[in-house]
Image (tube, helix red, strand yellow):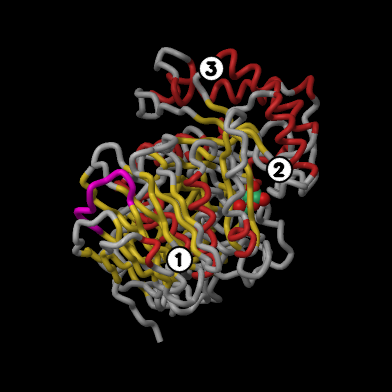
Amino acid sequence: MKTCFPFALGLLAATATAFASPVLTVRVDQPGARINPAMWGAFFEDINFGADGGLYAEMVKNRGFEFPEPLMGWIMIHPALAKGEVTMRTDTPFDSANPHYVRIASEGTGPLGVSNEGFRGMGVRQGEAYDFSARVRAGSGACHLSVALYGGDGVLLDSVELSGFPATWTKVTATLHPSATDPKARLSVLSLGKGVLDLDFVSLFPEATWKHRPGGLRADMVQALADLHPGFLRFPGGCIVEGSVLARRYQWKRTLGPVEERRILINRWNQEFIHRPTPDYFQSFGLGFFEYFQLCEDIGAQPLPILNCGMACQFNSGELCPLDQLEPYIQDALDLVEFANGAPTTPWGARRAAMGHPAPFNMQLLGVGNEQWGPQYFERYSRFAAALKKKHPEIFLVSAAGPDPNPADPRFKLAWETLRGLHADLVDEHAYGRPDWFFSNVHRYDAYDRAGPKVFMGEYAAQSVAVVSPVNRSTLECALSEAAFMTGLERNAEVVRMASYAPLYANVDAWQWTPDLIWADSLRVLRTPSYYVQSLFARNRGDRVLPIDFDPAGTHLYASSVTDDASGAVTLKIVNADPAPASVVLRLEGVRGVTSMVVDTLGSEDLAATNTFDHPDEVVPRETRVTVGGSPTMQISLEGNSLTVLRLGVDR
Ligand code: AHR
């Protein structure tokens, strides 16, 4: 049973030494390092059906019939009475980037065609509208099409009929209004009447996308991201940037322009884990670089694109682009800066303007490589850095420290030694480990060199069982260990400039990697305990670090403090990782008194507690407004197994 403890506060007139509780002194009058406004961000990768089947709201899987098995995701609808055939063809397609199409040759004795399952089912809502489109070409006869949505139980939810098709490829559209809400609907496109009809690029989007953009993003998933208040968005990966081989690397220029001209690519996570095979995982690039930049702008996050540096994933082939052939990769990076920031009079700025965004996207950050390591990386990174710094000294470059954050790891050591020598801007460390790792690394950055490159903790997440274990869960214990670790990042904001949890999204029916920050099914979004930790830190970022003196000996208490320039408010984040409530004497030095207090508490008696679609609010922050007595010293009580965020108005 869950018990909620009211936030307890005792005001002290006496000195703190009169109490057995540990004393937490905040030196409000000695503000330290400035905190990067983009300190707490998000990392998006197309993993776990995060883009196709996730954020990208397209509901038809394999809409262009371009998967290696062209009918993957589709079934033929060929009732016994329906005479004719459905064939796959590639001659005279509507677009050479999409060579495959379906030909339905019907004798008119019954409906004949294809039906799509969506990304493990299409989620449709009663009362909402869905935009259907397809490319159609009439061969002979007078065919017309039935476009229909069926529920998971086979009940017809809505249908429309389309007719009068020309003999050349044309785009047809229709709107469907399902009569019921269904998480596992299907879309059928059937030819009625006698004749031959060609069909391609079959698409279905909810009208209610994010900002109602046609062909846009899932509104509820973007909203969950926006609610995190991320200071930056790192995209599009992750290992998909690298590709298993270089031919399958992510190439941003191929993600621009009309969606039907964006050639699909097998997703690197399709075949990565034999215990979680996802043979139907491909990148449509409907969510391409323009859309990523637009998303960043929408949610007020700085864009941080990551580019392939001439190396395929070192967990896969590790294929290298020879150094003397690296120039196109570097040119892609230079062109990306121009695409994001260049005037509309420049070639790539003009391309952006033609897509409807003449204003620059103000990109300031760029990643060279993902999770690379070894001398081959530094040879390539240094060439990128030389070219980028020469032409765009205003761009901060993110470089890689490899997959293991432990100081004894030779790849990590070499990375730091080399990148320090190269005067790198930001070094991207990745940390996946059991909660213990995060608790024991709370002081990791206390001794980092302040004069060297800054740290970007670009991927981290506590793993309840083991890294890439399919039974990892996003428990409160994981979330608290991340929160404790984040107090260490915050205390060291002088050297740790940015941090992001990973991965961001997962489709409950099609994931490869767990834990993840946000889960989605075809209709709903689920925020995990780790999500609420991230949002509590981001919403209470502060402008400057406040030094604290805290010796929590014998307890598992972790703390950090910040202050806001504008309001002068003091914020404390305190993790109590012990099951029992804890009492702390809080002393604010350099203020006359505390005038107000708002407390957010995230916790539960059960460390294994998590949120599920059936019980999404098991672990959510609870806000309390506390009446304060004015004293700058007080005794506070912290729930067991909790993160507490205190926002204090102070009288200086
Ligand atoms: O976040 C999942 C993966 O973990 C990323 O793609 C990669 O960078 C890391 O190994």
User: Which mark identifies residue 392?
Assistant: 3
- Label 2 is placed on what type of residue? Gly
Circle nearer the N terminus (3, 1): 3
Tell me which residue sits at (80%, 43%) in the image: 410
* 591 falls in the magenta region: yes
Mark 2 lies on residue: 402
Q: Quadrant of residue 432?
A: bottom right
What quarter of the picture does the N terminus occupy? bottom left
* Image position, residue 165 (x, y; %): 40, 47
Q: Nearer the viewer, residue 37 or 260?
A: 37
Left or right side of 66 for 351? left
Left or right side of 71 for 215? left
Give the extent of the magenta segment.
588-597
How far is disc 3 from disc 1 in space, using C-alphas?
A: 40 Å
Tell me which residue sits at (80%, 26%) in the image: 322
- Label 3 is placed on what type of residue? His
Q: Nearer the viewer, residue 235 or 410?
A: 410
Tell me which residue sits at (37%, 54%) in the image: 572
Mark 1 lies on residue: 529
Q: Residues within 10 Å of mark 1 (few under 14, many from 20)?
A: many
Say which element carries label 2.
loop
The CB of the residue at mark 3 lies under 8 Å from ligand 1: no
Instruction: Confirm or deny contact between disc 3 and disc 2 (CB under 8 A).
Output: no
Q: Quadrant of residue 603?
A: bottom left
Circle nearer the N terminus (3, 2): 3
* Image position, residue 470 (x, y; %): 65, 69
How far is disc 3 from disc 2 in space, using C-alphas?
A: 25 Å
